[in-house]
Amino acid sequence: MRLNRFIQTLAVAVSAAAIISPAVAADITGAGATFPYPIYSKWAEAYKQVSGNGLNYQSIGSGGGIKQIKAKTVDFGASDMPLPVEELDKEGLMQFPAVMGGVVAVVNLDGVTPGQLKLSSEVLAAIYLGKVTKWNDSQITSLNPGAKLPADDITVVHRADGSGTTFLWTDFLSKVNPAFKEQVGSGTAVKWPVGVGGKGNEGVAANVQRIKNSIGYVEYAYAKKNKMSYTQLRNRDGQWVMPDDETFKAAAAGAKWDTTPGMAVLLTDQPGKHSWPITGPTFILMHKIQTDAAKAKEVLKFFDWAYKNGGKMASDLVYVAMPEAVIKLVEAAWKAQLKDTSGKAVW
């Protein structure tokens, strides 16, 4: 009797495993940039509903994502800083853009509403160099006549981890301010002269919300989600602009995707009176030779679905979906570059 019950129980368990295992096997893993985490989460939730396949994405920062894909511990890495062709070739990687967004300055100041405060690139650089230290400094008040700004110290918040958001922020400030370029430079991790660090866009947002009179930088979706006060910025054409999908699109309008090696397009400090000055695509990294071709195809199926069905979700979170012409370039690159161990195209 006990033996029969055991056999029945085992049969049920085996049947359940047979039902569950295909979905588990199809789950894909990725790690990296926190910049696109809100939209990747939204896409993953919707994709699982229609396909039954899941995405396990670790929001650990671009630096971590690059390390993990190089170590082959995930199916794809994610970085807001595109890798140069030389590094891609050395590591046997290919990259493609997934979505675009904008980085914004966020502040915690009593009485200051979202979009009210104006900050120029010169002032931002001076704050992050530790040269403008008070909110009532004349360089700030001259841009904001009539605003009630305190005579308190500015607490600078930056990323503590390797970060593509930091890369976009520092790339912009290095382009527009020679002193910042010389003293700090651009990169996913830099030596900050002043400030306190937060891990991920989440950590920076939390620190700015917690620390009165602070300033930080986050991807716009985090500012919107957390109802944070972001600033206007003055762009390359000298125009004051607000962050939104239209100003992000304006910055991307002149991108040369087809002629840029590795599709490593940078969208900071772009011309155009409507361009948001700290805009950027976020990239996916995959190995060109795939030892598990089926898993690699699942990754591509996810992003193919996201390209074709995720545009409204991206817009709702104030990201910018990739244009159709760019999607065609990406899928052509998949066919040309991603192979299984026998040399057969994965896609």
Image: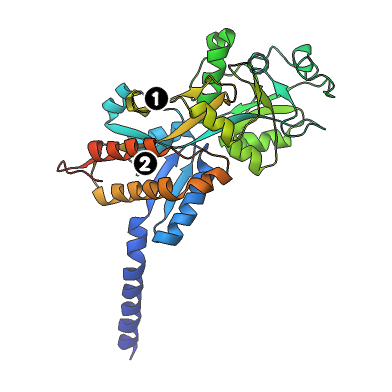
Side of 309 where 220 appears, left or right: right
Q: Visible in this render: residue 232?
A: yes
Give x and y (percent) for residue 194: 65, 19
Residue in the image at 46% along x and 32% along y: 281
The one nearer the camera, 115 or 90, is: 115
Q: Which residue is drawn at 41% across and 44% down?
A: 30
Q: Which of marks 1 and 2 is in front?
A: 1
Relative depth, front residue between 220 and 256: 256
Q: Which amino acid does label 1 sit on?
A: Lys
Category of crowding for the residue at label 2, using alpha-carbon neighbours closer than 10 angstroms: few (below 14), some (14–19), many (at least 20): many
Q: Where 287 sits versus 128, above or below?
A: below
In the picture of the structure, the residue carrying the numbered disc 1 is 256
Q: Position of residue 317 (x, y in %)?
A: 57, 44
Picture quarter with the N terminus: bottom left
- Tag shown at residue 76: 2
Tell me: 339 left or right of 263.
Answer: left
Q: In this view, does 3 lie above or below 130?
A: below
Label 1: few (<14), some or many (≥20) within 10 Å?
Answer: some
Q: Residue 309, position in %: x, y? A: 44, 50
Identify the image quadrant of residue 137.
Answer: top right
Do the residues under discs 1 and 2 have CB atoms within 8 angstroms?
no
Q: Which residue is drawn at 33% across and 64% down?
A: 21
Reply above or below: 330 against 312: above
Q: Which is nearer the eye, 20 or 36?
A: 36
Most distant residue in the bottom direction: 1
Label 1 SS:
loop
Callout 2 amino acid: Phe
